[in-house]
Image: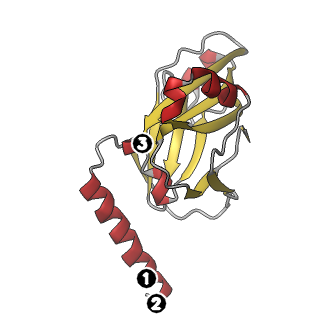
Amino acid sequence: MFGGDSIIRIVECDTIDNWIGFTFCVIFNGNNGDAIARSPHSSFSSTHPLYLSFESEYTEEYFDMRLNLKENGSKHIWIIYISREHCHFVKTGAHITFKAQPNVKIQRWWMNRILKEDIHDIRSFKQRFHSKLNHNHVHFDYVKKSNSCSGPKIQLPYNWYVTKEEEVENIDAKSKENNLSNAGL
């Protein structure tokens, strides 16, 4: 389980074949919905005050959902499932976090890898889910916040259409970029 402002990066994920995706769960409070709608310093819309962020060096992919937070101080839980073929954040090292408008307070969040046997043994899954085991053989680093700005990032809706060819191409491009960087270029 992570604190509300935690940012993580997956550094290793077992390559077992029996996982089918990840769930992300966030618990948050909606405070003063009218103030959210009037917030002049936010790029968020009043109906999308919270989103799951996958941030790389120059881009940020986000997954959001329409929310109506009119009740002051109301507590909410949001559960998101992303299937394995769309979990490119596992290989890219993207920074993973939830982001919210100033008047939305993220209490905590966690993620679970879903295994094939979870579908057949719902009790096992419920036990892991309720115990909030966030690793399931997934190793991650906490990302420290930096005050230095690396420049503007292109914000994109979460890319559900990454093909295997595109994934291989992205990995090859990142490898070449790293090799050039290591060579001092």
Asked if marks 2 and 3 touch (Cβ < 8 Å), the reply is: no
The residue under label 1 is 179
Q: Is residue 44 visible?
A: no
Q: Earlier in the sequence, mark 2 or mark 3?
A: 3
Pick whichever, 70 or 7, lies toward us: 7
Asked if marks 1 and 3 touch (Cβ < 8 Å), the reply is: no
Question: Looking at the rendering, in which quadrant would you find the C terminus?
Answer: bottom left
The residue under label 3 is 84
Picture coordinates of residue 145, whole percent (x, y): 68, 57
Q: Name the residue type under label 2.
A: Ala
- Who's the residue at 58% across and 55% down the image? 10
Label ID, residue 183: 2
Question: Mark 2 Cα within 10 Å, few/some/many (few <14, many 20+)?
Answer: few
Pick whichever, 114 or 123, lies toward us: 123
Q: How many marks?
A: 3
Q: Secondary structure at mark 1?
A: helix
Q: Secondary structure at mark 3?
A: helix
Q: Earlier in the sequence, mark 1 or mark 3?
A: 3
- Point out the frontmost of discs 1 and 3: 3
- The quadrant holding residue 71 is top right
Picture coordinates of residue 78, whole percent (x, y): 58, 24
Q: CA distance from mark 2 to mark 3?
A: 34 Å
Pick whichever, 153 or 95, lies toward us: 95
- Who's the residue at 56% across and 24% down the image? 121
Instruction: Reply above or below: 132 against 183.
Output: above
Asked if marks 2 and 1 touch (Cβ < 8 Å), the reply is: yes
Q: Is 86 situated left or right of 181 in this image?
A: left
Q: Is 18 situated left or right of 140 in this image?
A: left
Q: Name the residue type under label 1.
A: Asn
Question: Mark 3 Cα within 10 Å, few/some/many (few <14, many 20+)?
Answer: some
